[in-house]
Amino acid sequence: HTTAPDFESTQWNSVLDLYDRMLHIHDSPIVRLNRAVAVSYVDGADPALAELFKLDTQLDSYVYFHSARAELLRRLDRVDEAGQAYERALACEPALAERTFLERQLEAIRAES
């Protein structure tokens, strides 16, 4: 991912393979969250959201869990649920830069409704 000339050139199948390998070395909710993001670019938002659903109790207070969920819901045009997920991410009290980004995303979601 970091060696691709741009985002569109990312070899997401390779990224997913690396996360699968990482799970064998160190299985953790954070690795699974990051793997779900890779799944979203390989298989789509629905399978990735299913992977995130399995992590909801473990990562409920983790801002990146909720922001990833919000983005997946947004990609699925589930705008109301995406807005709720952005609100939940903001409730996790992220750092200022992240808060600003999330607030902008939430505003955009509300404008789409």
Image (cartoon, rainbow, N blue to C red):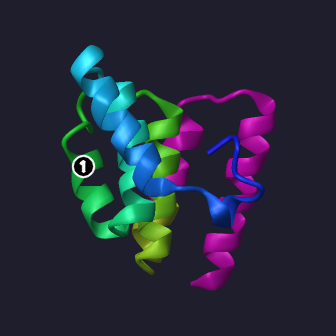
User: Which residue is painted at 65% across and 30% down in the image?
Assistant: 94
Identified at 52% across, 37% down, the residue is: 64
Residue 66 in picture, x, y percent from top left: 45, 44
- Highlighted range, magenta: 84-113
Characterize the magenta stretch by its predominant secondary structure.
Answer: helix
Using residue 99 as the reference point, say whether residue 45 is left or right of it: left
Say whether residue 6 is left or right of residue 49.
right
What's the residue type where badge 1 is placed? Answer: Glu
Count the numbered circles shown: 1
* Residue 41 in which image quadrant: bottom left
Q: Position of residue 100 (x, y in %)?
A: 79, 45
Q: Quadrant of the C terminus?
A: bottom right
| Crowd rating for badge 1 (residues with CA inside 10 Å; few <14, some 14–19, many 20+) | some
SS of the residue at dot 1? helix
- The residue closer to the viewer here, 24 or 58, is 24
- Give above or below for 89 relative to 12: above
Q: Is residue 54 left or right of residue 16?
A: left
Q: Position of residue 28 (x, y in %)?
A: 29, 21
Q: Is residue 110 magenta?
A: yes
Q: Residue at x 28, y 15 (%)?
A: 25
**Which quadrant does the N terminus fall into?**
top right
The residue lying at 80 percent from left, 36 percent from top is 97
The part of the image, by quadrant, that contains residue 108 is bottom right
Left or right: where 46 falls relative to 13: left
User: Looking at the picture, does residue 95 appear above or below residue 72?
Assistant: above
Q: Between 47 and 105, which is closer to the camera in this rendering? A: 47
Q: Tell me if I can see residue 5 in this picture.
A: yes
Outermost residue on the bottom side: it is 113
Residue 69 appears in the picture as rendered = no
> For mark 1, what is the residue?
51
Asked whether residue 92 is drawn in magenta, I would say: yes
